Image (cartoon, rainbow, N blue to C red):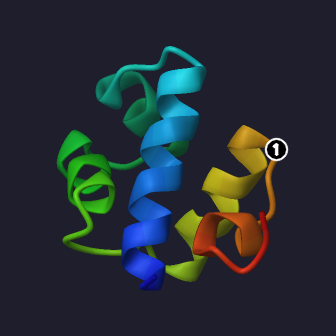
Amino acid sequence: MKTEKVFAERLKDLRMEEKLSVEKLAKNIGVSKAAISRWENGLQIPNIVYLVMIAKYFNVTTDYLCGLED
């Protein structure tokens, strides 16, 4: 499975598990709602800085987010 698709699915799943709106997650990590939407829809992937921020926010590894580990 492509990294973009895995990332998109895992980001959305993590956000939903925490019952966070797109707006709230965007605010918490300092990006636009549109950025979160593009990431969750697999249209774009975040740069390394935001990837690390997302991993820290959800207390997961970047490898997990990218589909390199379960």
Q: Amino acid at mark 1?
A: Asn
Which percent across, then down, holds residue 21? 36, 20
Circle 1 crowding by C-alpha within 10 Å: few under 14, some 14–19, many from 20:
few
Q: Report whether 52 appears left or right of 43.
A: right
- Above or below — where is 33 with respect to 1? above
- Residue at figure coordinates x 75%, y 75% from the top left: 63
Which quadrant of the structure image shows residue 65? bottom right
Q: Report whether 13 appears left or right of 40.
A: right
- Residue at figure coordinates x 59%, y 20% from the top left: 18
Which percent across, then down, holds residue 4? 39, 77
Q: Nearer the viewer, residue 60 or 5?
A: 5
Q: Is residue 28 visible?
A: no
Q: Report whether 46 appears left or right of 40.
A: right
Assign the C terminus to one quadrant of the image. bottom right
Which percent across, then down, holds residue 38? 21, 59
Q: Nearer the viewer, residue 31 or 41?
A: 41
Q: Report whether 60 appears left or right of 11.
A: right
- Above or below — where is 33 with respect to 16? below
Q: Which residue bears the numbered disc 1?
A: 59
